[in-house]
Amino acid sequence: MMEKENRKLSKSSHLPLYQQVVVYIKNKIISGEWPIGSKLPTQREFAKLFGVNRSTVVTALEELKAEGLIEGKMGASTKVVNNTWTLLANTAPPDWNKFVKTGFYKPNQSIVQEINKAESDLNIIQLGKGELSSELFSVENLHTVMHRCINRIDSLGYEVPKGLLPLRQELSKYLSTIGITCSPDSILIVSGALQALQLISVGLLRQGSTILLEEPSYLYSLHIFQSAGMKFSSLSVDNQGLIPSDIATKKQRNQSIIYTIPSFHNPTGIVMSEKRRKDLLQVCEKENLPIIEDDVYRELWIDTAPPLPLKAKDRHGQVLYIGSFSKTLSPGLRVGWLVGPEPVINRLADIKMQIDYGSSSLSQWAVAEWLSSGLYAQHLRAVRGNLTIRLHTMLEALEKYLQGIATWNIPKGGFFIWVKILPAIPMQKLFETALDEGVLFYPGSIYSSACTQYLRLSYSYASLSDIKQGIYRISQIVKKLM
């Protein structure tokens, strides 16, 4: 409920520090931003927000309890129980907490919510973010693209359900370079890969369906399919990717579908081998299982491009292929795509129109220009060169500071290094302490309950100096916890 914001208190104020905290919290309650039933941030979060010690926060909370605005017991959460006007009112206000709890969409894991808040803190070394650093985005190219767009655009009205035709035409050409034959009619423009997954969950699958997927997997950190009443069934993975022999035994009698990230898998970084891709397609054809191929990282290779997508070998319309410009260009554009059989694309396009009436026209025109001008291909070459430097920097830091107390993979592309901490230390404590000391990483447990000793480190976002400093701080915390 509390964003990461700068709320440092004034030592020159006539009010003591604890009273300034009281005023802040009271204003939140009185204004209705924190309605009755709301759970307050922890003492640790308050102390960090205001830049004070916990005793100051405790004094403020005790005063608010005495006024009857909040209540809470030692070791339990503190909640808003009244506000100044409801103390005088004859009728109780609506209990928004009940509404919040009854929504069908499941909330993020609490640790994922904490990560999402910390990602906006400019004072934290970001070793978790799955996006490119702003240093890798060419403002000069953006100016060029937008200038050309202005000369082409005669309207910014709603687009057709499947998305801007010039963009789908350019995507059709681009996809042909990686072996995928598809017409613009079989492409749906979406607001990022996440929207593609959500559309699939509500538009193609029924409640009780089973999603077969690698474990660990990025999908475990989300609740897109679970919120739609579906369940997961894990498939084993080795250094060549998903193991197809598990599929026949894991397939359920109810509707099933496979989800896979074959190129630079998130979080492990594994690239599915060409033979394994062939085997996977054969098994799925035999079992009559459709596949969701999430291929958002494939262009982020270091030395060698990954094998062609599963979709390139799909001869029966079995694969739904997801791509995005969020990882390769900019997440702020909110432009991705989904390729599939036309009846599927038509169905999901209709649902998308009901949800948002189409993705941003301006972003679609911009991406179409990036593709047609050749600037996107040029940009990808620059990105790969920069990612190579960042990867080597992180690997050197890991060797220097974590050698002997951790093991890790050496990815051939993507954003992530999958690290296993060898000592049996409390990983939640490692996460919290690192965050307190200004370093954010993603715990492996959000991708699989079996990966409690792992962390996912990203080398794509932080500066080179921050990468080194972040790894050093993590190593010092690990040694203290051993």
Image (cartoon, rainbow, N blue to C red):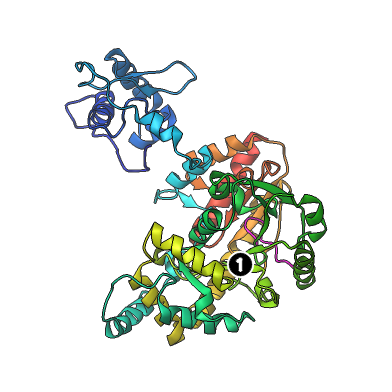
Question: Please, what is the three-letter code of the amino acid marked with disc 1?
Answer: Leu
Residue depicted at x 43% and y 30%: 44
Figure quadrant of residue 191:
bottom left
Span of residues in magenta: 265-272
Residue 239 pos. (x, y %): 77, 61
- Left or right side of 418 for 86: left
Residue 160 pos. (x, y %): 38, 73
**In this rendering, is residue 306 above or below 429?**
below
Question: In front here: 390 or 379?
Answer: 379
Residue 106 pos. (x, y %): 51, 41
Residue depicted at x 20% and y 21%: 85
Question: In front here: 479 or 359?
Answer: 359
Q: Main secondary structure of the magenta part?
A: loop
Figure quadrant of residue 445:
top right
Quadrant into which the C terminus falls: top right
Q: How many numbered marks, from 0 up?
A: 1
Residue 150 pos. (x, y %): 28, 81
**In this rendering, is residue 41 above or below 67?**
below
Question: In front here: 28 or 92?
Answer: 92
**In this rendering, is residue 134 above or below 43?**
below
347 is within the stretch colored magenta? no
- Judged from the image, the secondary structure of the residue bearing numbered disc 1 is strand
Read off the residue under disc 1: 320
